[in-house]
Image (cartoon, rainbow, N blue to C red):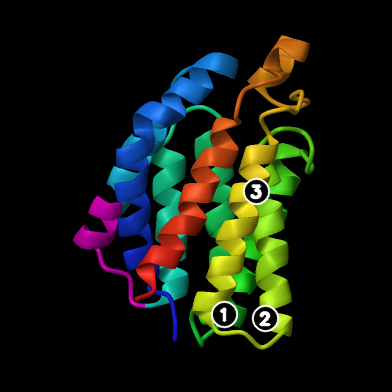
């Protein structure tokens, strides 16, 4: 069983469109109030680009996603999500996105975000959802679980990490300027990256 990157992005775009107002509401509390609109524009552009020029391999698809997001998403999210997918593409092997392959590409994407954003878990960023999701994937692969089980574990970990951002004080990004006023608000980046993991799970039938 493998994950089709194009179907993954279709599911992601649909989830972002469905949750764009909530993403903007979260961002209005601690950021620029544009995360929902930026992500909606970017994911729509990704789906259109993949349909217009269908990539021949999973690695090519992930690279195309990354380049499109960098071009079309404003703010910090474009470079971060773009870096995630470009790094993911570089780690994508010939076997595509089975459980081990998916774990490898998201681990590479996570490392790219860390290198670019200089954040770490506990800073109230997208990493607080993504990092535990990646760890859960690695654990599932080591246990010999199939892709569906691995994605179930990753999604549960991402949701728990997302929810844990609410009581945190932001230490990175625009939200960090608010100091203690950032406490009590769910992080929009952690929210959207949880949608990314949910989309992967929904894309595996």
Residues shaded magenta: 47-56
* Quadrant where the image shows the N terminus: bottom left
User: How far, Cα to Cα, is label 3 from label 2?
Assistant: 20 Å
Residue at image coords 61%, 52%: 158
**Tag 3 near tag 2, CB within 8 Å:** no
Q: Secondary structure at mark 2?
A: helix
Tag 3 residue:
160
Q: CB under 8 Å between callouts 1 and 2? A: yes
Mark 3 or mark 1: which is in front? 3
Q: What residue do we see at 43% from left, 24% from top?
A: 24
User: Which numbered disc flags the more N-terminal residue, 3 or 1?
Assistant: 1
Image coordinates of residue 58 in percent, x first then y, are 43, 74
Q: Position of residue 190 (x, y in %)?
A: 59, 40
Query: Of helix, strand and loop, which one carries label 3?
Result: helix
Name the residue tied to disc 1.
99
Kind of element beneath mark 1: helix
């Amino acid at each position: 069983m493998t994950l089709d990157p194009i179907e993954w992005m279709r599911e992601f775009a649909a989830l972002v469109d469905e949750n764009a107002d909530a993403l903007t509401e979260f961002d209005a509390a601690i950021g620029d109030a544009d995360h929902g609109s930026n992500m909606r524009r970017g994911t729509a552009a990704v789906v259109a680009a993949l349909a217009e020029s269908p990539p021949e391999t999973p690695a090519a698809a992930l690279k195309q996603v990354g380049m499109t997001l960098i071009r079309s998403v404003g703010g910090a999210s474009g470079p971060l999500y773009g870096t995630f997918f470009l790094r993911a593409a570089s780690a994508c092997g010939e076997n595509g996105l089975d459980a081990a392959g998916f774990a490898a590409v998201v681990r590479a994407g996570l490392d790219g975000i860390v290198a670019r954003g200089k954040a770490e878990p506990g800073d109230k960023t997208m990493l607080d959802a993504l990092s535990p999701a990646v760890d859960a994937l690695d654990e599932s692969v080591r246990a010999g679980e199939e892709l569906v089980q691995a994605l179930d574990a990753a999604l549960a970990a991402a949701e728990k990490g997302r929810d844990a951002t609410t009581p945190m004080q932001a230490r990175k990004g625009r939200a960090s300027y608010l100091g203690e006023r950032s406490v009590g608000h769910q992080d929009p980046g952690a929210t959207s990256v949880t949608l990314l993991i949910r989309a992967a799970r929904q894309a595996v039938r």
